[in-house]
Amino acid sequence: MTTPESPHKTALERERPNDSLPLRAANFLGDTIDAFDTLTRRYDDGPRADVRAEDSEGVRTRLVAKRAKRKRDRHAKTKVAFLRYSYYDVVFRFFVERVLDAEFVDLGEPTKVTLELGAMHSNDFVCAPFKHILGDYIEALDAGADVLVQFTGPCRLGYYGELQESILRDMGYEFEMLNFAEIAGKPLKEYVAACKKLVNPDLSVAQGVKGMLAAFKMVECLDAYHARYLALAGFDAHPGDSDAAREEFFAAMARCETRRDVEDVYRAGIEKLESIERDKPADALRIGIVGEYFTAADPRSNLDIERKLLAMGVEVSCSMNVTNRNIRYNEPELRREIEEYVAYDMGPTSTLTIASAKRYADEGFDGIVHLKSSGCTPEIDCMPVLQRISRERKIPVLFLSYDSQTSDTGLDTRVEAFYDMIAMRKASR
Amino acid sequence: MPTQNKDSAPYADVRSIGLPRALMYYRYAPAWKAFFEALGREVVVSRQSDRAMLERGSARSVDECCLASKLYMGHVESLLDACDAVFVPSLANLGRFKSFCTKYQALPDLVRNTFDEESIRLVSCVVEDQQSKTSMRTAFLDLAAQFGATPKEAKAAYKAGRVALERAEKDARESFEKALQGVERARKERRDEDADESLAILVAAHPYVSHDRLIGGPVVDALRDMGVTVLFADEFDRERAYKESGKFSSTMPWLINRELIGAMLCLRERVDGIVAVSAFPCGPDSMTNDAIARRAGNTPLLSLTVDAQSGTAGLETRVESFIDILRYRRKGGYLQ
């Protein structure tokens, strides 16, 4: 095999293409100069050893250093990765493929290693979602992602993106970050500009808007389906039927291309789910799940507490989902519902947590489970309010706090004890 | 003239206001005192933090709350019978990237639900500039009206508060600069001598940590016992610090953490070391401490997390060894 003619060859090389002696000579000369240079520096005027942490660019100030624009490969689509968040990977894929017109990096199921990686590179008392997501990003970058997407929020979430980007860069990864914290609060065209700059310069805005509407519809359909699943799946005559139907539904959803497809798949999915043979006792226990944005909705963060409850034959409801917190969220309206308990907005998901707990109590649920990441300030601040709701409206509340543990034995014990308690309480009435 | 009826002026009958000496008191005390005094109210400040207060506060708090928040509850409890109402504002933000920890935002509701059985009376207002455009000024003018003040009186009271705060901040800035220059001068003059050089240590912590006797007190005492000059990062020029923080981070949401980081960046060449103190488990600090540590450059940084521990020996050991290292280094004992 012959190497193509390089335009940078010296005149000498062009004259005698097969003779590498000049090159070897040059290398030898260079090495010698280097060695002398090192010798003088090390043994004459310099300090005996250099233990300073300073790098050659001097003291750095910026957490995430500015850098040159990534060169675009015209022959390949940009690979975009999201974090793992519950069943929304279907929507993330749709967003990447239909809105950004890029390639989606499928992360698959998380493993223990994911969290170990994330926790290893995080501060130990940062909230648990940060660790989960950092683990996701490391796996995404190892899988070849070019762009990572991070959201923003009014709590620590607002700083996730920048800190994670800096951690990953300090680890040596090269990538772009589509960090919505940089854009939040700005007009829509800034979002479009950021997507064009980082992901796809040929992005079609018309196509994108159409895709976004379908994506929102998809979120609503997924959430509505999941809510129905939680209410029904605990009572399958043949355990596992609902789970199988749900898997099938998600797979069908992942194949949708338009808003119409989404609606059709949803209708068919719900029909299928409802038609499964069930055996529901008249006095089935009902448990409502409330809590923090990530932990309450993400099964690997809460060690799949929904499935544990369903397996016990409980009708479950979980108020925390993207539809309730974002798409159809109405802060003033919800706050009016709970004005006897709180006067102000207490944090990102606080109003939703308190309002849903109150609703569950009023609708005669048998218990409430409050899920949060360890150290989640806003949800910790909700706890005295939930305790008061529990006292005044006579409903037991189980408070669970999650960090990077992966064993669920302790959780099983607590959930079973809670179940026994509310079951006995119900029987005695 | 607005009529002073109960609906428009629900606080008209409040004669004395309690200020818990905790959390944002350490930042806004001069303004709050002057404001309420200008409205003709008596201001009662809770006593300095002590261990009994922390124990009372912890008993009332969820155990995962941060140390400073537990202490706050202790302060509120100590005020229960000492005043007509306790002032607990909801501070959300002063604009974009000028947010407060959600703890200060949730405080009024947190206090109300924690002291539910004592039927505590609160005076409160909400400061939320980012979405609802409720600035500090709007919030306090509105609050004054709720005390039955006329618009003119309200403006005068707000102005009194603002002027008092500005004066206090200016004094702090000046004494900060003076102390730092003092160290720098001493350093120059004593260059050749063998004696211990004077060290300037920047204590970077939320004001309610560094100035509280119970939380940051032991750290500051340990530093002073070692004969170093202690400088508080929150007393540095706040505007300059905030601006400087923009060079560090484009999306950091928290105002106070920005000011602390800005101060560290402005001063890292001028001080001998930085001691960052956090109250366990501080939400914002859990993220920013990590970030700072990776960009501190050559300035030695000691990061301390304080919880409700009853002994201070461990803390003293760490502070002493940090200062010893700095001194030894200054004398050329370590490889540079």
Image: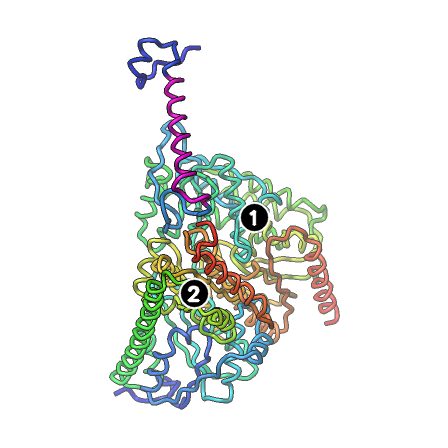
Can you tell which quarter of the image residue A147 is in? top left
Q: Is residue B69 left or right of residue B89?
A: right
Can you tell which quarter of the image residue A209 is in? top left
Q: Please report contact status of discs 1 and 2: CB closer than 8 Å, yes or no.
A: no
How much space separates mark 1 and mark 2, taking CA atoms?
44 Å
> How many neighbours does mark 2 have within 10 angstroms: few (below 14), some (14-19), or many (20 or more)?
few
* Residue topped by disc 2: B195
**Chain identifier of the residue bearing label 1 in the image:** A
The N terminus of chain A lies in quadrant: top left
Q: Which contiguous range is marked in magenta?
A: A23-50
Q: Amino acid at mark 2?
A: Ala
Query: At x 51% / y 67%, what residue is drawn?
Result: B279
Q: Is residue A297 above or below residue B263?
A: above
List x then y, in percent, for residue A347: 46, 64
* Residue topped by disc 1: A120
Main SS class of the magenta portion in the image: helix
Q: Looking at the image, which is closer to me, A158 or A169?
A: A169
List x then y, in percent, for residue A362: 58, 69
